[in-house]
Image (spheres, grey):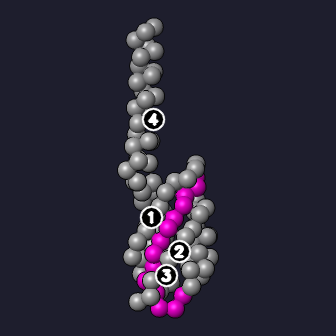
Amino acid sequence: MGIVGAAIIARWSYGLLRTAGAVLVDMVPDVELAGRIRRVIEDNGGRVSDLHLWQVGPGHHAVIVAVVDNGASPSSYKSLLADLPGVSHITVEIERA
């Protein structure tokens, strides 16, 4: 029973280390979602200069994006990104070209 218990604890701790490690090294949790965010912004005239995506809960992501643009407001990009599933918190910074 001791060996079985050790195996169960080892499996659980391995999963915990993988999950915690991904958070600590700031891994992009969903590469496909990051690509969709980039495409939405670039299809609407902006250029992404910096993009950070974090998982803040099961199925919920926070995004901070810096956009190079000449005329759009941050709220216009926030409204475009609000329709993406799984994006709960959005921060947009506009850099003038």
**Residues packed near mark 3 inside 10 Å, few (<14), some (14 to 19) or many (20 plus):** many
Label 4 vs 2, first from the N-terminus: 4
Q: Dots 1 and 2: beta carbons under 8 Å?
A: no
Please name the amino acid that badge 2 sits on. Answer: Val
Can the viewer see residue 70?
A: yes
Q: Given this view, does label 3 or label 4 mark the residue nearer the observer?
A: 3
Residue 5 in percent (x, y) is at 46, 15
> Separation of disc 4 and disc 2 at Cα?
32 Å
Q: Helix, strand, or loop for circle 2?
A: strand
Q: Is residue 80 above or below residue 9?
A: below
Q: Residue at x 55, y 58 (%)?
A: 61
**Residues packed near mark 2 inside 10 Å, few (<14), some (14 to 19) or many (20 plus):** some
Tell me: 91 left or right of 47. Answer: right
Which residues are the magenta region?
59-72
Label 3 vs 1, first from the N-terminus: 1
Seen as rendered, the residue at the extreme top is 1
Numbered mark located on residue 52 in the image: 1
Seen as rendered, the residue at the extreme bottom is 71
Please name the amino acid that badge 4 sits on. Answer: Leu
**Residues packed near mark 1 inside 10 Å, few (<14), some (14 to 19) or many (20 plus):** some
Question: Magenta region, mostly helix, strand or loop?
Answer: strand
> Separation of disc 3 and disc 2 at Cα?
7 Å
Numbered mark located on residue 16 in the image: 4
30 falls in the magenta region: no
* Residue that mark 3 sits on: 94
Residue 2 in percent (x, y) is at 43, 9
> Separation of disc 1 and disc 4 at Cα?
23 Å
Q: How many marks?
A: 4
Label 1 vs 2, first from the N-terminus: 1
Numbered mark located on residue 92 in the image: 2
Can the viewer see residue 39?
A: no
Q: Dots 3 and 2: beta carbons under 8 Å?
A: yes
